[in-house]
Image (spheres, rainbow, N blue to C red):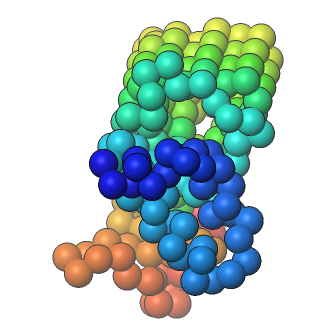
Amino acid sequence: MLARLLVMPIGVWKLKKLCRSTRNPLLRKILMSLYSLYQYENNSSVAWNSHFDGEPCFPHGMKSVFVSGGARVGKGCVIFQQVTIGSNALPDSKGMGVPTIGDNCYIGAGAKIVGKVSVGHNVRIGANAVVFRDVPDNSVVIAGGTEVIRKDVAPDNRFYSYVGGWVYWDESGWQPVTDEAVLARLKQQ
Protein backbone atom coordinates (compact mmCIF):
# COMPACT_ATOMS: atom_id res chain seq x y z
CA MET A 1 0.00 0.00 0.00
CA LEU A 2 2.82 2.40 0.89
CA ALA A 3 4.56 1.89 -2.47
CA ARG A 4 1.29 2.47 -4.33
CA LEU A 5 0.77 5.78 -2.53
CA LEU A 6 4.34 6.90 -3.28
CA VAL A 7 4.31 5.74 -6.91
CA MET A 8 0.83 7.01 -7.91
CA PRO A 9 1.85 10.69 -8.40
CA ILE A 10 4.56 9.81 -10.95
CA GLY A 11 3.29 6.46 -12.29
CA VAL A 12 4.99 3.09 -12.33
CA TRP A 13 6.20 3.36 -15.95
CA LYS A 14 7.81 6.73 -15.36
CA LEU A 15 9.44 5.30 -12.23
CA LYS A 16 10.71 2.33 -14.29
CA LYS A 17 12.20 4.72 -16.87
CA LEU A 18 13.84 6.77 -14.11
CA CYS A 19 15.46 3.59 -12.74
CA ARG A 20 17.03 3.02 -16.18
CA SER A 21 18.08 6.60 -16.89
CA THR A 22 19.21 8.03 -13.54
CA ARG A 23 22.99 8.36 -13.34
CA ASN A 24 23.19 9.25 -9.63
CA PRO A 25 23.93 5.93 -7.82
CA LEU A 26 22.18 6.87 -4.56
CA LEU A 27 19.06 8.17 -6.32
CA ARG A 28 19.03 5.10 -8.58
CA LYS A 29 19.17 2.80 -5.53
CA ILE A 30 16.26 4.67 -3.89
CA LEU A 31 14.18 4.57 -7.09
CA MET A 32 14.93 0.87 -7.65
CA SER A 33 13.95 0.10 -4.05
CA LEU A 34 10.64 1.93 -4.48
CA TYR A 35 10.01 0.18 -7.81
CA SER A 36 10.83 -3.21 -6.22
CA LEU A 37 8.45 -2.53 -3.34
CA TYR A 38 5.68 -1.66 -5.81
CA GLN A 39 6.37 -4.92 -7.69
CA TYR A 40 6.31 -6.89 -4.45
CA GLU A 41 2.97 -5.39 -3.42
CA ASN A 42 1.53 -6.36 -6.82
CA ASN A 43 2.98 -9.89 -6.79
CA SER A 44 4.72 -9.09 -10.06
CA SER A 45 8.25 -8.73 -11.32
CA VAL A 46 8.71 -6.51 -14.35
CA ALA A 47 12.47 -6.01 -14.20
CA TRP A 48 13.59 -2.38 -14.16
CA ASN A 49 16.04 -3.22 -16.97
CA SER A 50 13.45 -4.81 -19.27
CA HIS A 51 12.74 -2.61 -22.28
CA PHE A 52 9.27 -1.55 -23.47
CA ASP A 53 8.90 0.60 -26.60
CA GLY A 54 5.66 1.97 -25.17
CA GLU A 55 3.49 1.49 -22.12
CA PRO A 56 1.71 -1.87 -22.49
CA CYS A 57 -1.95 -2.50 -21.66
CA PHE A 58 -2.56 -4.72 -18.63
CA PRO A 59 -6.34 -5.40 -18.78
CA HIS A 60 -6.31 -6.98 -15.31
CA GLY A 61 -3.45 -4.94 -13.87
CA MET A 62 0.21 -5.94 -13.46
CA LYS A 63 -0.58 -8.57 -10.87
CA SER A 64 1.34 -11.84 -11.31
CA VAL A 65 3.15 -10.68 -14.46
CA PHE A 66 6.85 -11.57 -14.77
CA VAL A 67 9.24 -9.99 -17.29
CA SER A 68 12.96 -10.81 -17.14
CA GLY A 69 15.66 -8.18 -17.25
CA GLY A 70 16.85 -7.57 -20.79
CA ALA A 71 13.57 -8.70 -22.38
CA ARG A 72 12.22 -6.37 -25.09
CA VAL A 73 8.53 -5.68 -25.71
CA GLY A 74 7.27 -3.58 -28.61
CA LYS A 75 4.59 -0.86 -28.78
CA GLY A 76 0.87 -1.46 -28.36
CA CYS A 77 1.13 -4.82 -26.58
CA VAL A 78 -1.66 -6.25 -24.44
CA ILE A 79 -0.46 -8.47 -21.59
CA PHE A 80 -2.95 -10.41 -19.47
CA GLN A 81 -2.50 -11.77 -15.94
CA GLN A 82 -0.02 -14.50 -14.99
CA VAL A 83 2.12 -14.00 -18.11
CA THR A 84 5.82 -14.86 -18.01
CA ILE A 85 8.28 -13.29 -20.45
CA GLY A 86 11.31 -15.04 -19.06
CA SER A 87 14.94 -15.70 -19.70
CA ASN A 88 16.49 -19.10 -20.23
CA ALA A 89 19.84 -19.30 -18.43
CA LEU A 90 20.53 -23.03 -18.85
CA PRO A 91 23.96 -23.42 -20.45
CA ASP A 92 23.21 -26.47 -22.64
CA SER A 93 20.03 -24.98 -24.07
CA LYS A 94 19.66 -23.85 -27.67
CA GLY A 95 17.40 -21.00 -26.55
CA MET A 96 19.58 -19.38 -23.90
CA GLY A 97 18.75 -15.67 -23.62
CA VAL A 98 15.71 -13.39 -23.33
CA PRO A 99 12.64 -12.90 -25.54
CA THR A 100 12.04 -10.06 -27.99
CA ILE A 101 8.39 -9.32 -28.69
CA GLY A 102 7.23 -7.18 -31.62
CA ASP A 103 4.61 -4.43 -31.82
CA ASN A 104 0.86 -4.93 -31.36
CA CYS A 105 1.06 -8.36 -29.75
CA TYR A 106 -1.71 -9.85 -27.61
CA ILE A 107 -0.45 -12.19 -24.89
CA GLY A 108 -3.25 -14.23 -23.29
CA ALA A 109 -3.59 -15.14 -19.62
CA GLY A 110 -1.00 -17.59 -18.34
CA ALA A 111 1.10 -17.55 -21.52
CA LYS A 112 4.80 -18.28 -21.13
CA ILE A 113 7.41 -16.91 -23.55
CA VAL A 114 10.78 -18.27 -22.53
CA GLY A 115 14.32 -18.01 -23.84
CA LYS A 116 15.94 -16.28 -26.76
CA VAL A 117 12.90 -16.22 -29.02
CA SER A 118 11.67 -13.56 -31.38
CA VAL A 119 7.93 -12.98 -31.50
CA GLY A 120 6.96 -10.98 -34.59
CA HIS A 121 4.57 -8.06 -34.96
CA ASN A 122 0.78 -8.51 -34.71
CA VAL A 123 1.01 -11.90 -33.01
CA ARG A 124 -1.72 -13.33 -30.78
CA ILE A 125 -0.52 -15.78 -28.15
CA GLY A 126 -3.39 -17.78 -26.66
CA ALA A 127 -4.01 -18.40 -22.97
CA ASN A 128 -1.57 -20.86 -21.40
CA ALA A 129 0.47 -21.23 -24.60
CA VAL A 130 4.19 -21.86 -24.14
CA VAL A 131 6.42 -20.16 -26.70
CA PHE A 132 10.01 -21.40 -27.00
CA ARG A 133 10.58 -20.96 -30.75
CA ASP A 134 10.49 -17.90 -32.99
CA VAL A 135 7.03 -16.79 -34.13
CA PRO A 136 6.63 -14.94 -37.47
CA ASP A 137 4.62 -11.74 -37.95
CA ASN A 138 0.82 -11.99 -38.15
CA SER A 139 0.59 -15.38 -36.43
CA VAL A 140 -1.52 -17.05 -33.77
CA VAL A 141 0.02 -19.38 -31.17
CA ILE A 142 -2.25 -21.77 -29.27
CA ALA A 143 -1.60 -24.10 -26.35
CA GLY A 144 -0.83 -27.54 -27.69
CA GLY A 145 1.39 -30.58 -27.54
CA THR A 146 4.76 -30.79 -25.89
CA GLU A 147 7.97 -31.76 -27.60
CA VAL A 148 10.41 -33.85 -25.58
CA ILE A 149 14.12 -33.50 -26.36
CA ARG A 150 16.14 -36.48 -25.19
CA LYS A 151 19.83 -36.08 -24.39
CA ASP A 152 22.56 -38.72 -24.24
CA VAL A 153 23.99 -37.12 -21.11
CA ALA A 154 21.80 -35.79 -18.33
CA PRO A 155 21.79 -31.97 -18.35
CA ASP A 156 23.51 -30.30 -15.42
CA ASN A 157 20.81 -27.98 -14.09
CA ARG A 158 22.89 -26.52 -11.26
CA PHE A 159 24.53 -23.69 -13.19
CA TYR A 160 22.99 -20.49 -14.57
CA SER A 161 24.35 -17.65 -16.67
CA TYR A 162 23.92 -14.39 -14.78
CA VAL A 163 25.21 -10.89 -15.61
CA GLY A 164 28.12 -12.07 -17.73
CA GLY A 165 29.19 -14.87 -15.37
CA TRP A 166 28.05 -18.22 -14.03
CA VAL A 167 26.37 -18.92 -10.70
CA TYR A 168 24.83 -21.83 -8.79
CA TRP A 169 22.44 -22.03 -5.85
CA ASP A 170 23.25 -23.46 -2.46
CA GLU A 171 21.60 -23.06 0.95
CA SER A 172 23.38 -19.74 1.57
CA GLY A 173 22.28 -18.15 -1.73
CA TRP A 174 23.69 -17.61 -5.23
CA GLN A 175 27.41 -18.37 -5.48
CA PRO A 176 29.79 -17.52 -8.36
CA VAL A 177 31.36 -20.44 -10.22
CA THR A 178 35.12 -20.22 -9.67
CA ASP A 179 36.28 -23.73 -10.66
CA GLU A 180 38.18 -23.24 -13.96
CA ALA A 181 37.32 -26.76 -15.23
CA VAL A 182 33.60 -26.17 -14.68
CA LEU A 183 33.81 -22.71 -16.30
CA ALA A 184 35.57 -24.18 -19.34
CA ARG A 185 32.85 -26.85 -19.71
CA LEU A 186 30.06 -24.27 -19.35
CA LYS A 187 31.60 -22.01 -22.00
CA GLN A 188 31.68 -24.94 -24.47
CA GLN A 189 27.95 -25.66 -24.15
The answer to whether one can see residue 57 in this image is yes
Q: Position of residue 28 (x, y in %)?
A: 60, 74
Viewer-nearest residue: 14 or 9? 9
Q: Position of residue 84 (x, y in %)?
A: 47, 36
Residue at the spot 64% in from the left edge and 30% down from the top edge: 56
Task: Give the image quarter of residue 150.
Answer: top left
Relative to 28, residue 41 above or below: above
Relative to 12, residue 181 above or below: below
Residue at the spot 75% in from the left edge and 15% down from the top edge: 122
Task: Give the image quarter of residue 27.
Answer: bottom right
Instruction: State the quadrant of the C terminus.
Output: bottom right
On the picture, is 178 further left or further right than 119? left
Viewer-nearest residue: 104 or 144? 104
Relative to 122, residue 66 above or below: below
Q: Position of residue 58 (x, y in %)?
A: 53, 26
Viewer-nearest residue: 60 or 83? 60
